C-alpha cells in the first residue's frame, strides 16, 4: 500500500498527480525550486519541500535532493511526471534502492528503451514493425554506405542516445551520407557522450501515431488506442487527438494487439507509449517512451479512465483494473497545448498573469497550474495549460474546441491561443489531412504571406 507520494515535478503535471492522490486518499508531497515557492503544486500538495535553486540541474534534476526530500517527509513512493527524471534509469534504480516505490517501469525497461538501437532490436524481435535500416549500429562509414545502398536513399542517420528529434541527419545520396556521417557521430558524442549511430530509410511524409499501452509487470498488458501527434513544431507537439482521423478499428486493433503482446512478453510494468511513423497504411516503430506523456488526457477522455490512478495501482499492486475487451473508444478528443509564447516566433513570454479565466462546460477540461497573480518563471518550459476537448465525434470536438478557445482568457503574458483559432479555419485540419511536416510548412507559408 502506498501512503504518501512525492511528486518529482512541477506545473500542470504535478497538479494532475496531486489530484489523483487526493481521490485515492494518498498523501502528496510537492518539491520545488526557490523560483517555484508560490507555484500551485506547492499550494495544493499536503506538504512541500524546497529542494534547490531555480536551475533545474540543482533542483528538479537533483537525485540527492529528491531522495532527501523523501526521507524527510516519509514518502514511500515517487511519481516523476514527464520530463526531468522521468526516463532516468539510474534515478528509478536509486529510488528503489532506498525502498521507495518508483511509479513507473523498471530501471531495466527505462534503460532498454532509452537506447534507441536496443529498443529497436527488442521491438523487432517482439514482432513490432520497424523502419527498414541497419539493424544495429553502423560503426564505420563503409557499413553505413552498405546499409544505405540496401534500403535505398533517402536515409536518416540517428544517434542511439538521441530521440525527440535530437541527433538526426537526412542523407539523400551517398555523397551526402559521406558528408554527414562523421559529423552526426561527433555531435552525438558531444551531446550524449555516446557516438553510436544507426541508419534508417527516411520516410518523407508520415504521420506520427503513438500507441498507449499499460502492463502490470507480471506478463499482462493492454493497449488504449492511439494518439495522432503529427502537428508539431521543432519536435514540440502543438495539438494531439485521439482517435487518429486516418485509422479504422481493424488497423487499430491489429497494431494495438501487436504492441500489447510485445509488452506482455517483456513483462512491462506501468504505462508507456510506443511511437510510430505511419505512411501508406503501414506502421513503423521509431521510439518508446517509458513515462506518462503530456498528451495522456486525450486517451483518458476517449476511454473514461484515469491513467495516473492506473500507474499508482500498478506500482502498488501489480494489477490492471480492466481487461482489453472492456475498453471501448467513446467519441473524440483533442488537446491544445497553450504555451506562454509570443507569436509568430514562439518567443517565450514569462511574467505575471494579470487575469485568467479557464474555459468550462460539457466536454471541456483545462489542465493548468496558473492562477491570477501567478508569475511564470523564465527557467522552465513554456507550457501553461492544456485544453482538452471531448465530444461524440471529431466534427463536434472541433466545434466545441472553437467555443472553448473563445472562453479562454490569459492576460499579462502572450500565449499561443490564437494559433489554434487560426488552425481551426484550415480545411486540412478540419479534414484531418496533415503529416508531420504540415504545421511547419503552414507557419512558413503564413510568414511568407505577411512579408509580401
Ligand atoms: C524519422 C523521420 C523520417 N524517417 N525517421 C523526429 C523525432 C524522432 N522521434 C524521430 N523523428 C523522425 N524520424 C525516419 N526513418 C522523421 C522524423 C521527424 C518527425 C517525427 C515525428 C514527428 C515530427 C517529426 C518532424 C521531423 C522529423
Image: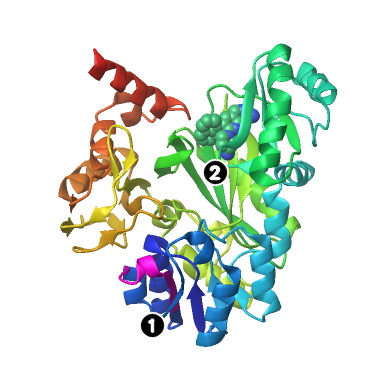
Query: For mark 1, what is the residue?
Result: 46
Query: For mark 2, what is the residue?
Result: 210
Q: Is residue 199 visible in this depiction of the protein? A: yes
Residue located 34% across and 30% down the image:
429
Could you say whether the residue bearing mark 1 is in a helix, strand or loop? loop
Q: Quadrant of residue 130?
A: top right
Q: 144 left or right of 214?
A: right
Could you say whether the residue bearing mark 2 is in a helix, strand or loop? strand
Vertical side of 343 occupied by 332: above or below = below
Vertical side of 71 occupied by 391: above or below = above
Residue located 16% across and 50% down the image:
407
Residue located 50% across and 83% down the image:
4
Quadrant where the N terminus is found in the figure: bottom right
Instruction: Give yes or no for residue 50 being in the magenta stretch.
Output: no
Lower sequence index among marks 1 and 2: 1
Q: 430 left or right of 246?
A: left
Spot occupied by residue 56 in the image (x, y as percentages of width and height): 49, 60
| Of 165 and 439, the residue lying toward us | 165
Spot occupied by residue 218 in the image (x, y as percentages of width and height): 71, 68
Q: Is mark 1 within 8 Å of ligand 1?
A: no
Ligand 1 visible in quadrant: top right
Spot occupied by residue 234 in the image (x, y as percentages of width and height): 46, 35
Which label belongs to residue 400? none
Q: Is residue 132 visible in this depiction of the protein? A: no
Quadrant where the C terminus is found in the figure: top left
Distance between the Cα atoms at labels 1 and 2? Answer: 35 Å
- Badge 2, how many Cα within 10 Å: few under 14, some, many 20+? many
Spot occupied by residue 284 in the image (x, y as percentages of width and height): 64, 34
Vertical side of 143 occupied by 253: above or below = below
Read off the magenta span.
29-39
Amino acid at each position: 500500500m502506498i501512503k504518501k507520494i512525492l511528486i518529482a515535478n512541477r506545473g500542470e503535471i504535478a497538479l494532475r498527480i496531486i489530484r489523483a492522490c487526493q481521490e485515492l486518499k494518498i498523501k502528496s508531497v510537492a518539491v520545488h525550486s526557490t523560483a517555484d515557492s508560490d507555484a500551485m503544486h506547492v499550494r495544493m500538495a499536503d506538504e512541500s519541500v524546497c529542494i534547490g535553486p531555480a536551475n533545474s540541474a540543482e533542483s528538479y534534476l537533483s537525485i540527492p535532493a529528491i531522495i532527501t526530500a523523501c526521507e524527510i517527509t516519509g514518502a514511500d513512493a515517487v511519481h516523476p511526471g514527464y520530463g526531468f527524471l522521468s526516463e532516468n534509469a539510474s534515478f528509478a534504480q536509486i529510488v528503489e534502492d532506498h525502498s521507495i516505490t518508483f511509479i513507473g517501469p523498471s530501471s531495466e525497461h527505462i534503460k532498454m528503451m532509452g537506447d534507441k538501437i536496443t529498443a529497436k532490436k527488442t521491438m523487432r524481435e517482439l514482432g513490432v514493425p520497424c523502419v527498414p535500416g541497419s539493424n544495429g549500429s553502423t560503426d564505420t562509414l563503409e557499413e553505413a554506405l552498405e546499409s544505405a545502398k540496401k534500403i535505398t536513399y533517402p536515409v536518416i542517420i540517428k544517434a542511439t542516445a538521441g530521440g525527440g528529434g535530437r541527433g538526426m541527419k537526412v542523407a539523400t545520396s551517398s555523397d551526402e551520407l559521406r558528408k554527414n556521417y562523421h559529423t552526426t557521430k561527433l555531435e552525438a558524442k558531444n551531446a550524449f557522450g555516446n557516438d553510436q549511430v544507426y541508419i534508417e530509410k527516411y520516410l518523407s511524409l508520415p504521420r506520427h501515431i503513438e500507441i498507449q499501452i499499460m502492463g502490470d509487470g507480471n506478463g499482462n498488458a493492454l493497449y488504449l488506442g492511439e494518439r495522432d501527434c503529427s502537428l508539431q513544431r521543432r519536435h514540440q507537439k502543438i495539438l494531439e487527438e485521439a482517435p487518429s482521423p486516418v485509422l479504422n478499428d481493424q488497423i487499430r486493433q491489429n497494431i494495438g494487439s501487436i504492441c500489447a503482446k510485445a509488452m506482455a512478453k517483456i513483462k512491462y510494468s506501468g504505462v508507456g507509449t510506443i511511437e510510430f511513423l505511419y505512411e501508406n497504411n503501414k506502421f513503423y516503430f521509431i521510439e518508446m517512451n517509458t513515462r506518462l506523456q503530456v498528451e495522456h488526457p486525450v486517451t483518458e477522455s476517449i476511454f473514461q479512465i484515469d491513467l495516473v490512478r492506473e500507474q499508482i495501482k500498478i506500482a502498488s499492486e501489480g494489477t490492471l483494473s480492466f481487461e482489453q475487451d472492456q475498453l471501448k473508444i467513446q467519441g473524440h478528443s483533442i488537446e491544445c497545448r497553450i504555451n506562454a509564447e509570443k507569436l509568430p516566433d514562439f518567443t517565450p513570454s514569462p511574467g505575471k498573469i494579470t487575469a485568467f479565466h479557464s474555459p468550462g462546460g460539457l466536454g471541456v477540461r483545462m489542465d493548468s497550474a496558473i492562477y491570477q497573480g501567478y508569475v511564470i518563471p523564465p527557467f522552465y518550459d513554456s507550457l501553461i495549460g492544456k485544453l482538452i476537448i471531448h465530444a461524440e465525434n471529431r466534427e463536434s470536438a472541433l466545434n466545441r474546441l472553437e467555443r472553448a478557445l473563445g472562453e479562454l482568457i490569459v492576460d499579462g503574458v502572450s500565449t499561443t491561443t490564437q494559433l489554434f483559432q487560426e488552425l481551426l479555419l484550415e480545411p486540412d485540419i478540419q479534414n484531418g489531412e496533415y503529416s508531420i511536416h504540415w504545421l511547419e510548412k503552414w507557419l512558413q507559408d503564413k510568414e511568407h504571406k505577411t512579408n509580401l
